[in-house]
Amino acid sequence: MKRKKWEPYLWLLPSIILVAVFVIFPIFIVFKLSFSEISKSGVVGGFIGLRNYSEAVQLPAFKTVMKNTLWWVLSVVGLSTVAGFIIAMVLNQKFKGRKIARSILILPWATSLVIQASVWNYIISYEYGNLNNILLNLGIISKAINWRSSYQIEFVWECFVGIFVTIPFVTFCVLSGLQSIDPSLYEAATVDGAGFWSKLKNVTIPLVRPSLTVSTVLNIIYVFNSFPIVYTMTKGAPANKTDTIITYLYMLSFYERRKGPATALSVIGFLILCVCAGIYMLGVMRKEEE
């Protein structure tokens, strides 16, 4: 009896050790460093309380970076979820070439983010970008457009690329949920006189919600911590106007050598992420209970 009681935990022990070593322990170290004095060369000193946090909050770019991060996460996660859901609905239908369409869709997600950001940098280039060439050849525009004329527009392009590479993940998460729905439920709804929107509201969305919840929570974490797109496209220029919290703390730590505030900023980001994911999960759980 004792063996049966402890056997499941023994099977989980390797995973628990890996999580403890590579996740929990590093988090503990970062929290500890955020309350310590750290020199520009990386030498850790004594306990200094909340000084690093105070310096991080008072940084000139702090408010801009936090606002950018909020818009970055909301736009990428929100729009990719809507677009992914719609595309999943389409790909769940039977049509000629469906397998090819699914294969093509996964390419943006499977390709390196650095490569994709570099390609989009080339596409929207004013001097030699393909976007201007295509629009000029089609006669849509009469002269080349500077697609990066302001930092606001550059930030929009960052968000666009983020949405573009995130849609496949959401699509296949939702598609897995759609394929698990019993077709007889739709047949019963049709017999009851339900139309498309009624089926969507009362059958599709409730049954796909678990898959959608998983994809949204993972997306929030993934997008919040996304580094390659922003860094490759703009490096936060000009003057951190297009930075998110992840790229900014990297620049702060490795370029400005302000490792203390950078560590504090990483902890702030971690706590924000935990709160956001927790609130979302609680909201979903309450809806399911209702």
Image (tube, helix red, strand yellow):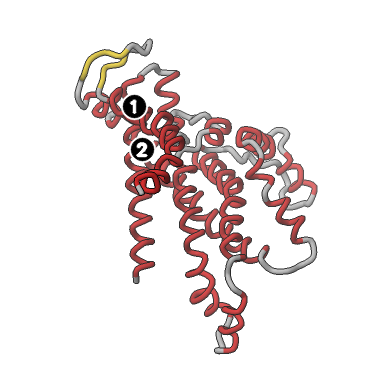
Residue 241 appears in the picture as rendered: no
Q: Is residue 142 above or below residue 212?
A: above
Q: Is residue 36 above or below residue 285?
A: above
Q: Would you call the spot at circle 2 few (<14 residues within 10 Å), some (14-19), or many (20 or more)?
A: some
What type is the residue that disc 2 sits on? Phe
Circle number at residue 3? none
Badge 1 element: helix
**Percent x, y for residue 255?**
44, 18
Q: Which quadrant of the structure image shows residue 108?
A: top right
Count of marks, rendered view: 2
Q: Are marks 1 and 2 in contact (CB under 8 Å)?
A: yes
Q: Which residue is mark 2?
A: 270
Residue 22 visible in the shown view: yes
Mark closest to the chain's N terminus, 1 or 2: 1
Q: Disc 1 designates what residue? A: 30
Q: Position of residue 272 (x, y in %)?
A: 34, 42
Q: Nearer the viewer, residue 28 or 20?
A: 20
Which quadrant is home to the C terminus? bottom left
Residue at figure coordinates x 29%, y 25% from the top left: 34
What whole-number distance in Å separates the C-alpha atoms at marks 1 and 2?
10 Å
